[in-house]
Amino acid sequence: MNIVILGGTGLIGQALKNEFQHSHNVRTFGRAIYQDQENLLASIQWSDILIQLSGATIAKRWTSKYKQEIWDSRIKSNQILANIFGKLEKKPKVFFASAVGFYPESFCEEPLDEDFLHSGNDFLSQLSVEWEALARKISEDALIFRFGVVLSKEGGALKEMLPMYKLGLGGPIGSGKQCFPWVYIKDLVSAFNYAIDKNLAGTFNLTSPQLITQKKFGQSLANQLKKAFFLTTFEWQLKLIFGEGSQVLTKSLAIKPTKLSEHGFVFKYPQIENTLKDIFND
């Protein structure tokens, strides 16, 4: 098949490209493609599958200006796609990346899944609501994956955390009781393959079925690296560094991938210990 990945220059886009290019024709584009709508239209017309991953990283300090960039990089890109799709006679199957930040805060003892329809009230929740609404406007049979924190040695949150942990300076964030929604990038790629094969549509959580606290994750990472785990990072410290963006690290989200499991998908790496072992032995 012909596959186009928008936002394809990032961690997830590159992992999907590396997987798909063995058996499909793949084209990847960064956000600059939205400035060249003629090329964008031609690429979408060429595609059988369109994967929309575009968006500025949320792992930075949030100023008012940067929050607007986070919003525009997602919402305006989907608005452009909505205009293009209105012109197409043959429309590709579309996959959209959303986030478990859609949900309100929850804890590991009482997880939420796709049947919980009420979003949270914070910035990331409202961004997800708007993004997903536009996704459904673009394509009624779209598949929306709500990602947890994607674990990979190549980038993302884990790569940012490693220097401190390798120095033995890892520790819980606040109480450490926040539920930590995560997924190994190998399982994420497998889920995309499975969804393509089964022609899935609708909204799916893409998180590991294992519910763990932030403290459990940090201890597992420290154990894998054979380092200490004791230095608490307080919420006020994170707010000094990330501003309002500190909520990415402090919000507790207990999310289950119920629909994927019901459709027969099996996670190869459902446990954090085996996942980290595979990451560092790969």
Image (cartoon, rainbow, N blue to C red):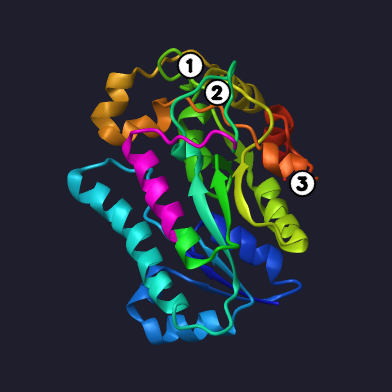
Task: Report x, y in % for residue 52.
Answer: 50, 63
Q: Which residue is drawn at 37% across and 55% down?
A: 56
Tell me which amino acid carries mark 3.
His
**Residue at the spot of label 3:** 263
Q: Nearest the camera: 81 or 116?
A: 116
Instruction: Tell me the chief SS of the magenta region.
Output: helix
**Residue at the spot of label 1:** 176
Q: Nearest the camera: 19 or 93?
A: 93
The circle drawn on residue 218 is 2
Relative placement, left or right, of 203 versus 40 is right
Query: Does 121 appear in magenta?
Result: yes
Mark nearer the viewer, 2 or 3: 3
User: How many C-alpha atoms fall within 10 Å of the one at disc 3: few (<14), some, or many (≥20)?
Assistant: few
Mark 2 falls on what kind of element? helix
Q: Quadrant of residue 69?
A: bottom left
Mark 1 falls on what kind of element? loop
Q: Residue at x 62, y 58 (%)?
A: 15
Task: Report x, y in % for residue 207.
Answer: 62, 38
Tell me which amino acid carries mark 1.
Gly
Range drawn in magenta: 115-134
Q: Nearest the camera: 93 or 237?
A: 93
Tell me which amino acid carries mark 2.
Gly
